[in-house]
Image (tube, helix red, strand yellow):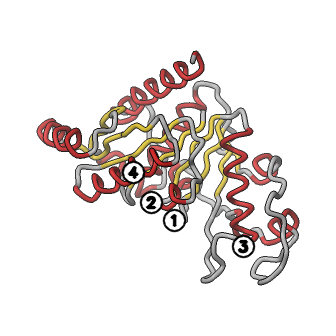
Amino acid sequence: MKIAITGKGGVGKTFISATLSRLFEKDNYNVVAVDADPDMNLACALGIDEEIIPLSKMDDLIEERTGAKVGEYGSVFKINPMVSDIVEKYGYTVNDANINLIVMGTIEKGGDGCVCPASVLLRRLLRHLILKTDEVVILDMEAGIEHLGRKTTENVDLMIVVVEPSKKSLLTANRIKKLAKDIGVSNLYCIVNKIKNNEEKKQFEKIFNEQVNIPILGYIPYSNEVSKCDLQGAPLNLNSEVGKDIKKIYDKIKKIKNNNTEE
């Protein structure tokens, strides 16, 4: 199953991506967790302290696979580079678990654009992970809607929009809904994060159903424990109350997976 986690910045995409990766791994799935956000915080959410070099900064790898040096303008390079061994060779195994972390990185030099050798390699790898691999792939996407405009996530099995109780988050969810439909994403669901109480949940649910109306997989309460984990760079305790709430969402995702398999 290939799952893209998207939404407005700051809503908790990375926290949810990390926790879902760990739940799949706990159920004996091989997981590829992909940090496709230029802010690159998925390693921290998985409890990794050391700095991981993103693929976008591996100049030798980019040159080897594309035939062009990074930053060399006007050069001819392969637009279909080999990527099938990158997870095995350059993925980071998380705590000896069945989770391989891939940090994509971003193009940092102004003017390089989306057709430079590094960008071509990253896009090719994402497409390979979505279409050609047997592992569960969790994509922690960049904030906003740009990845939909580039059709990066058009073939995922499931796209999850993470929202919080704010107007800005609802606006982003609506834009994602439209663009996801445009590129043919059929399984679009929502996770509502940072709900403070039942009254706020009722108010949000009413507005959300009127203005966005994406099926909701579940609600995650605002939690001091999650804030503490963020501060310490530690993964969430899966047996905590919040962990149990996400486990319920995970069980629903598995049902979607099984229904798709049967179809």
Horizontal and vertical percent for residue 178?
39, 49
Q: Is residue 44 above or below residue 218?
A: below
Q: CA distance from mark 1 to mark 2?
A: 9 Å
Residue 12's tag is 4
Callout in the foreground (1, 2): 2
Which residue lies under the disc numbered 1? 39
Q: CA distance from mark 4 to mark 3?
A: 30 Å
- Of the two numbered discs 1 and 3 in the rendering, the one whose residue sits closer to the viewer: 3
Residue drawn at 40 percent across, 58 percent down: 231
Quarter of the figure that contains the N terminus: top right
What residue type is disc 1 on?
Asp
Secondary element type, mark 4: loop
Above or below: residue 11 compared with residue 68? above
Circle 3: residue type: Cys
Outermost top residue: 262
Measured from the top left, where is residue 179 in percent x and y? Answer: 44, 52
Which residue in the protein does label 2 denote?
143
